[in-house]
Image (spheres, coloured by chain):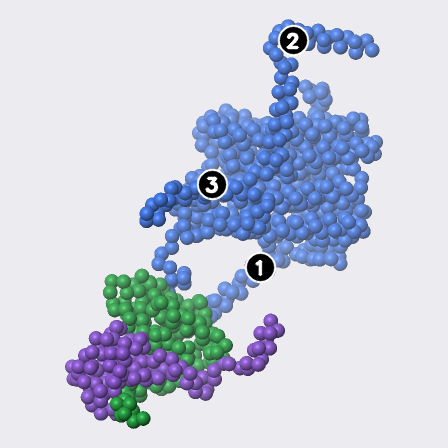
Chain colours: A green, B purple, C blue
Amino acid sequence: MTRDPAAGGAMTPEELRAAIARQFGRSLHIRTLDTGSCAVCEQEIRLLAAPHYDLHRLGFFFTPAPRHADLLLVTGPMIRAFEVAARKTYDAMPGPKVVVATGACALGGVYPADPFTHGTVDAVLPVDVWIPGCPPSPLALLHGLGVAVGRLAEKVRDLPFTADDDPERERAAP
Amino acid sequence: MTLWFVRGLRRGVVTTRYPARPDESAALLPSPPAFRPRALTEDTARRLVQACPGGALQLARNAALLFDVGRCTACGRCAAAAPDAVTRSGAWELAASTRSVLIKEIPLRGEAR
Amino acid sequence: MTPLDCYYIAAVAWAVAALAGLIAVRAAGGLRACCALSALGGAAAAAGGGWSLLHGDTPVMSLGAATVTGGPVQLQATSLAGVFAALLGVVAVAIACYAPRYHQPSPGTALYLGAYHVALLGCLAVLAAGGMVTFLVAWETMSLACYLLILRHPRDPAVARGAFWFLALSEAGFLLVVAAFVILSAKTGSTTLSGIAAHAAAVPGGWRAAAFLLALAGFGFKAGLVPLHAWLPEAHPVAPADGSAFLSGVVVKLGVYGIALFAFRLAPPAGAWPGLVVMGGGAVTAAVGILYAMAERDIKRFLAYSTIENAGIIVTALGAAMIFRASGQQALYALLLIAGIYHVANHGCYKTLLFLEAGVTEHAAGTRDMDRLGGLVRRLPRSAVIAFAGTLGIAALPPLNGFVSEWLIFQGLFQGFRTGSHLTGILIVLAAGTLGLTGGLAVYAFVRGFGIPYLGMPRTRQAAQASERGQPVLGPALLAVLCVALSVGAPVVLFALSKMARTVTGVTLGPLLLPGNLTVIPAHTDFAAFSPTYLSVFLVCALAVPLLIYLAGRPRARSVRVPVWDGGIVSFKPRMQYSAMTFSAPTRVTFDALYRPSVSVSRPADDDPAGRSGPVHYAAPVTPVFKRYLYRPLVRALEWLADLVRPVQSGDVNLYLLYVFVVILLAYLLGSV
């Protein structure tokens, strides 16, 4: 996270987490940025404002103006044609600011780096939180936003993505 | 207008209480796979790597399968290629603050931890 | 010494300036000498005009015995003409400071300066005329001199056409004015203006009405009342900038002076209906004028239509004054007369300024088309600041002078309920509503008129290379200072104008207009109040507050400077900006029924397999409603009539001899009867 240059000195991780929670925990303005996605991530992001998920009850709001934004929610594989606009959007946000990359495209999947695309948002913008998914469901996005403001704990570190069950034994046993 | 209002009153509150209360409706959606190390022979692993279109599965040198959760699109091709080795994980709270945390090392032919 | 003596000095100075202009322009310093004399004359006229406001009417002076015009030249400095003469003087001074840097010494300039000073003399004589014949001769002199003025480049067909429109409509108006004067002087038996005014009771009501309507139409041609306005947008673009400034700043006001003369001094008709006609005509003129202004890309045509709009506002105020007089509301009558005359002075200042700046723009950037300009605030900084002062004035934004006079007019109109007649009250409210619409559109129009050429990025290379070196600045700057002075010093101006109103109407408005403390009230203490002086000071101080907040609140830590958020665009192109026509598109769509654009789209053959089609031409010219449906049928009717009469001029000598014989026979018969 890019901190406000007015605050001096380095912080411990706990201090940083506390600072983030204090700064953004109760009110966060999100600016979405589509760097060339297929727009399905955008549809899931739009659902966040619908009654089923309602991000406003958590104090999160969408804003179109980077000047008013605290968090940049980036989708898409960062096509090269969009690089200037992405940098300008990021620069226009005043510190402290958080960048969240979401969707398989933004995390490096789907598209490799080639003359037309960077393939990952990390190549142009400093990313603070990654949200996998294709597309990430609105609940996954809420979890990711909660992690970004320090309200929710990361869980993926403890997930092994392994299964212990034996399918043959289950097929054998009626 | 009145009909919509009455219908809405009858339906009640549909907003999820997440994150105050757990909400597992997202677990029913397509999710990244979980692997069965017992069924992961090197041959199976190589087949899985070839089947993944997004490059989420790679073979590491020390006989492990590297699975990048971030690159996974839950397309299901790995499950179709080796149904014994792959099952659905149902995991959806996948946000991470470092990229490396999303790259999981699955041991081949070893015991599941 | 009377104000009339100041006018004599001005006349002599301008006569010498005309000669100097004709003879000595090509000599070194000849142009400057001519302009110095012109400025001297202007100062004298301005002094005389201002003085006559306070002095009241001078007695009628007759110069010389029988002259070729059939009677002695009769001059009188009236206070009603005072403001107009002061405006004439001020405009002359401003143009005199402007002309040396605008014109090149050449034979064309010599003739132009000669004509211009004869026009100045004509205007002064119209304002100082005490007799009917003097007035008419001076009026015609002014018209013809203005025609020569517009015809600075006679070889250009557009110039010739514009000048011809001016001349034709001037002459049409002149005929009607002559008829009006003849009716009045025949019925009252006097040819001096004060004589006509004194014997006004001798004119029966029907003749009064006829004379007034003839005068309204005749002077309306010059003032630019719709539908008699057609010459304004034709003549202004083709005249040199100072010529256009003179036309809009002074000549159009003389039309208003003529209407005021017939409405307030010479035998005005009784009843409320003349006032209603004048007010209604003025309101329609104002609305139509600004609506057509929105569709113009040429800066000078745009300003010409804006002149029509302001003439409409002034005439509306005068009409309402007539209504209030008819219903016995003397204080409001005087107030609206004052407000209308105040607006004359204000409009003269800022419209002249804007036309002079349009000339500077034309010389600096080479074009008058708004869509070819842009970013001039960086290339011509001083001109931009001066033009901005003029724009603030004409958009009637506080604290400048346009706001003060329009506020007075509105406050006068809002008190229409005091007339006691419901119908009149409703019509006055309708007029006020129309003026409100006009005011809003004027702000919109002038945001466009200032923003498109001066702000943003240059749209062409010529605009990007415009240079202020050698451009006149002093003349327009004087007018800008005067605009501010007329607003901050509004109490002083209103004091002088209330003296004028006392002479013209007999109503003493002192405490009902200026109750003290530099406040202005509209003729009734229980209605409204406003102080232009305090407002100006307050607005200047109010700017200090954000400044102090900024200075106090600047972050002490090192801050990051990043470019302005522009939507993430890679690079701005000039064509991404608003153009003049897209900015006014909402108005043009809303008032589509008035503009009736005839849209034409032409694209080259689109059989390109790749789908490319080349440049597409889109044109949506506004239908010239008045020319097509009023003037052209009239001209055709006249031509048909002329064709009918043509056989009379057969070219046969025998037929002509027959005519001579018949006329002699008739004269003999009539003489013996």
Position of residue B27 relative to residue C414, above or below, is: below
Disc number for residue C368:
3
The residue shown at (31%, 61%) is A81
In the picture, residue C18 is in which quadrant?
A: top right
Identity of the residue furthest to the bottom in this view: A173
- Chain under callout 1: C
Q: Label 3 amino acid?
A: Arg
Residue contact at pointers 2 and 3, CB within 8 angstroms:
no
Specify the quadrant that holds the C terminus of chain C: top right
> Which numbered tag is attached to residue C453?
none
Provide the residue designation for mark 1. Answer: C539
Q: Work out how far the residue at label 1 is from the one at label 3, CA to CA, in angstroms.
A: 34 Å
Vertical order, C663 against C354 (above or below): above
The chain carrying label 3 is C
Type of the residue with mark 2: Tyr
Residue underneath mark 2: C656
Residue B52: give x, y in percent of width and height.
25, 75
C610 and C458: which is toward the camera: C610
Please tell me which residue lies in front, B44 or C574.
B44
Looking at marks 2 and 3 on the same chain, the residue that comes earlier in the sequence is marked by: 3
**Quadrant (top left/top right/bottom left/bottom right) for the N terminus of chain C:** top right
How many numbered discs, if any? Answer: 3
